Image (spheres, grey):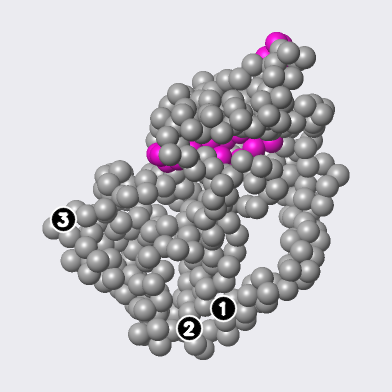
Amino acid sequence: MVTQLVLGKPSETFWEAYQHLWENSPERSPFKAPHLLRYFSDVTPDTLGAFVFVREGKLRGAFLLKERRGVCTFLSDLKTDVNTFVLDRRCTNEERHAFYQELLTAIRERGWSFELNNQPAQADYLLLLEAAARQMGMHWLLVPHSTCPMLKSATPADVEMRLQQNHRYRYYANRLRTQEQAVFRAFDQEDALESWVKAYCQAHVQRWANTPTPSNLQSVRQQKFLLHCLRAWHQDGLAVRFSLHLPDERPIAFAIGLRQPPALVFHATTFNPAFARYSPGKALIYHIAIWMAQNGLSVLDFGDGDEPYKYDTANDERPLCRVFICQKAHLTCRAKALFFRYLKAHPRVEHAYRYKIKPLAAKVALLLHALAEPTEAMLAGL
C-alpha cells in the first residue's frame, strides 16, 4: 500500500485511473464524478492537490482537495450537497483506516487545518477519522450543519403511488395541464442545454428578486459555471433536466436531477414567479415521481437544505455535519469551529446570520462581480 499527497493539477494518467476508481466506489456520488471534478480543477483559484492510495499499481482511494491560506477542503465544495471520500468498494477496514491516518499525517506535516463540509453525520469513516486525529493529538470538532430530506420507497412504483395519493400535488399538475396546457419534459442528453440553462437562470433571478437571498445567478460567471457543471454531469451520464413547458415552448418550472441509483438527487429547482399561483414547482415534482417509476429509481433525495416544501413528501432525512480537524495551536480553526457550534446552539443568532448577515455578504459579492465582469470583458477585447 502506497499513499502520497501530490500538489498541483492532476495529470491525464490520474484522471484515467480516477474514472475506474469512481466507477468502483460504493456511492458513485455525482458530486465526485470525474468530469465534474476535472472541470473544478480547471477553474479553482486555490492550490490543488490529490491524496492517493495505490495498491498493486491500482488507484484504490483518492481525496481531491483545494487549499487556501492553510485550510484544506474538498474540491467538490465548489458545488455539492454531500461530500464523501472516494474509495474502492473492495478496500478492507484496515486499508480504510490506514488511508485516513496517512491523510491526516500528510495534512499535519504541511501545517494545514482540515474543514470537511456537508459530511453525512452517520458515515462510519468519521469514526475512523476521529480516532486517527485523537491518536495524533489533533483537535477534532464535529458540528451539526444541515439535513437532506428524502422520500424513500420500497420500489420505484411506490414513489409514483405516494405522489398520486397526494391530492394537492395531483391537483397542481392537473391544473397546469388543463389551464395552461403545460407539458412535462426530461432531458438526459446535452440537447438544448444552453437555452435551458439561460431560461433557468432568468427564472431563478426573477424568483429570488426582492428577497433577503437574491440569486447568485445574476452573475454571468455563475451562469457559465452552472452550464459547465451540467455539461460535465451529462458527460458522466448523471444529469437529467426536468421542466414544464407552455405550448409556445417556454419553460416555467425547472429542476436539476442527478442519478445516484437507487436515488435521484433533486439538486436544484426554480420556477417563473409569474406562474406562482399554480405551484409549478410542486407540479413538477409530481411528474418527476412518475418519471422515476418509469426509470427504476425508488428514492427522491431532496439534497442539502430543510426548505418546508421538501417535507410535504419526505419521509426520512440524512443529517449532515461539518468537521474541523487541526493542530491544537491553530487557534483560527478552533475559533471558527466554536463559532459554528455556537450558532447551532442558539437558533435566533443562527437565523440572523443566515437571513441577514450572509444575504448582505451575498449582495456585496454580487456587486463586486457586477463591477468586475465589464472590466474582464474590456480586458479580453484588448
Q: Tell me the amino acid under the disc marked 2.
A: His
> Which residue range is magenta in the image?
246-270
Q: Tell me the amino acid under the disc marked 1.
A: Cys
Sequence-first disc among 2 and 1: 2
Disc 1 + disc 3, Cβ < 8 Å: no
Front: mark 2 or 1: 2
Residue 333 numbered mark, or none: 1
Sequence-first disc among 1 and 3: 3
- Location of residue 122 with respect to 139 vertically, above or below: above
Q: Residues within 10 Å of mark 1 (few under 14, many from 20)?
A: many
Front: mark 3 or 2: 2
Task: Give the residue at mark 3.
Answer: 57
Q: Is 327 on the left or on the right of 315, as rendered?
A: left
Residue 60 numbered mark, or none: none
Disc 2 + disc 1, Cβ < 8 Å: yes
Task: Give the residue at mark 2.
Answer: 139
Q: Is 17 on the left or on the right of 330, as rendered?
A: left
**Image point (22%, 69%), residue name:** 94
Say which element carries label 1. Answer: helix
In 3D space, how far apart are the residues under numbered discs 3 and 2 (Cα atoms)? 34 Å
Q: Provide the major secondary structure of the magenta segment.
A: strand
Say which element carries label 2. Answer: strand
